[in-house]
Image (cartoon, helix red, strand yellow):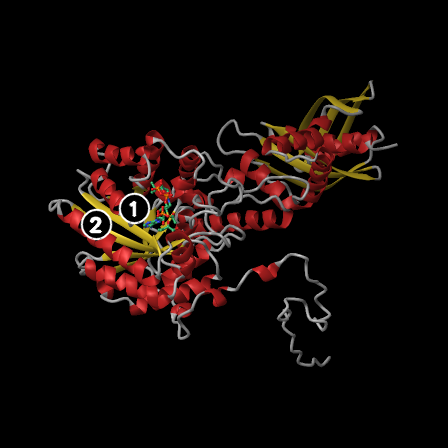
Amino acid sequence: MASCETTTFPTLRTPSGDLPADAPGWNPQRPSAMPHHRYQPVHDRVALPLVDRTWPSRRIERPPLWVPVDLRDGNQALAEPMDTARKRRMFDLLVAMGFKEIEVGYPSASRTDFDFVRHLATSGAVPEDVTVSVFTAARRDLIDRTIASIEGLPRTVVHLYTATAPTWREVVLDRSRAEVHGLIEDAATYLMRRAEERPGADIRFEFSPEVFNLTEPDFVLEVCNSVTELWEACPDRPVIHNLPATVEVATPNVYADQIEYMDRHLARRASVILSVHPHNDRGTGVACAELAVLAGAQRVEGCLFGNGERTGNVDLVTLALNLYAQGVNPMIDFSDIDAVRDVVEHCTRLPVHPRHPYGGALVHTAFSGTHQDAIAKGMAQHAKQAAEQGVRAEEAAWAVPYLPIDPGDIGRTYEEVIRINSQSGKGGIAHLLRTHHGLDLPKAMRPDFSRTVQETSDAGGQELSHKDLWELFRTTYIAPAEDGPVKLVSWSTAETGPGAHRFACTLDLDGRERHCQGSGNGPLSALTDALGTAGIAVDILTYAEHATTTGPGSHAISYAECRVRDTTCWGAGLDTSLLAASVHAVMAAVNRAERSRP
Ligand SMILES: CC(=O)SCCNC(=O)CCNC(=O)[C@H](O)C(C)(C)COP(=O)(O)OP(=O)(O)OC[C@H]1O[C@@H](n2cnc3c(N)ncnc32)[C@H](O)[C@@H]1OP(=O)(O)O
Ligand SMILES: CC(C)C(=O)C(=O)O
């Protein structure tokens, strides 16, 4: 046995950022000329709070409260913000899907946003069990306008935000830590006072320390705790502390540590709803939200299909369906995901990428042969197990390779699951012919047809639909029975005794008619005998047949693999009579072989 020495791989980065001269031989990568030294790791940008983390060993067993912010954060990222009609369409979709708290706008920011909140207040569009949330910066003039917008709404959350991270304090707000804290306390107090002027209105509060993920942990804690106190939070009237990764800057474990720190240290924890609001700058927004929930987050703000500033807000579709795929009810209805996608595309005027998790047009589709083979076998196995258990296929436990969830659960059809191009294999092709045309090709015939399909798609460079496949099958294997050098002009069979058959026919051999007869232990052996009398030696090597559908009027299909002289070919026949189908299958094989003779 070969022995293996323990190798310690050197770290690839030197203080100057270059690859060390002794980089291991297995890795031939070399430094690029890009100025990576301009950027700092997150650990040098902000104090990170936790070492004794517990989130890695937890599991998510119920969904958080989902809060869509499509109508605010998503909307503010659009080149053409939604008008009232589009906003209303999105709002109605969110309600229909089961969201119970919905951020509907930044009413002090624009007439359109203000008017939409007024529209909700006056149109009766907000169901009894839905709370709308409105967003405002920590400025008295903007708070006044916000409060004016919600007049008449029975339940609201007013969401107040101010950036707390050092760069924002210095560059944007031009205020010290204490001054920013003062600004927040002033705005929170003012908001509380304005809300108290409406004793009957059910107004709750949310606070977001914008850029939480780059803020010193002790400062965020100090600010949030003072806001909790100012707003007199109690378990019956909890405040929402929403901790955004406004610009994603670190691996998701770092965000999870930050959230677990807050979860453990927030004052009056039972009076606080801990919320997260990840963006997706590093492409890990979903992971951030999931790990944050493990770390104690109870509420997640995001957008459908991840619309939002820059690379977007965290995608609620992926988050919810990730839970679904783990057997957890997401408490949101995605049973018609294409309808959801249509509304989102209409309202945002942005396309959803075809590879977008769960909702993209191509995410349940396999083009490649081995995947198709596995899916086809998996689907057949699934149907069989469901039948054995006496349940409908839609109810049986799902374990089909390459398909994390049953596409049918989110309103997709199985038509799109297997699509054929030059990378496809016999399993996928057979699956399409079976599911769409009722043909169950014999296993031995599949490689033969697969070669024909591959030649065709290679030549055209294009995808073949199931209709194309059927047409190719028909012209390749069925049509030659009537379109070749050996035609059956007329024929008949008779059973002349027990196990004895006669086949009489008139053949058209390249324009010359000839009458033949043959006998055998079945009609097909009698046919080959008749052909032999015309000088065409035929052996039937493989034969299969079945009905293409059930019930009266169903067609029969026969498949025959024949050695004709020294050439072996497959043929097929389709007819309402099984005997006719089998005779045509043999004649098709004969003609294909005869055609291929020099
Ligand atoms: C992370 C996020 O998504 S935050 C939300 C971002 N969304 C939007 O900005 C969309 C809507 N915004 C707007 O329409 C406008 O910015 C308005 C109407 C709210 C305010 O407009 P203006 O009064 O013209 O101010 P402007 O947009 O230039 O905002 C900058 C001012 O607000 C201050 N400011 C910024 N954020 C906050 C805040 N959260 N709390 C208090 N003041 C703030 C800035 O320091 C700056 O003040 P300065 O003028 O004294 O330097
Ligand atoms: C202030 C909040 C909630 C926000 O939109 C963000 O930080 O991205």
In the picture provided, is 515 more to the left or to the right than 571? Answer: right
Q: Residues within 10 Å of mark 1 (few under 14, many from 20)?
A: many
Q: Nearer the viewer, residue 192 or 397?
A: 192
For ligand 1, tell me if the residue under mark 1 lies within 8 Å: yes
Which circle's residue, 2 or 1, is located before the other in the chain? 1
Visible in this render: residue 298?
no
* Label 2 – label 1 distance at C-alpha: 10 Å
What SS does tag 2 mark?
helix
Residue type at mark 1 is Thr
> What's under tag 2, amino acid-wise?
Leu
Q: Residue 122 at what x, y percent from top left? A: 20, 32
How many marks overall?
2
Label 2 CB-ligand 1 distance < 8 A:
no
Q: Is residue 26 left or right of residue 93?
A: right
**Residue 298 location (% of width, % of height):** 31, 58
| Disc assigned to residue 191 | 2
Q: Which residue is mark 1?
A: 136
Q: Residue furthest right?
A: 598
> Mark 1 and mark 2 in contact (Cβ < 8 Å)?
yes
Across and down, in percent, residue 293 comes to 36, 60
- In the displayed structure image, the side of residue 214 where residue 298 appears, left or right: left
**Label 1: element kind:** strand
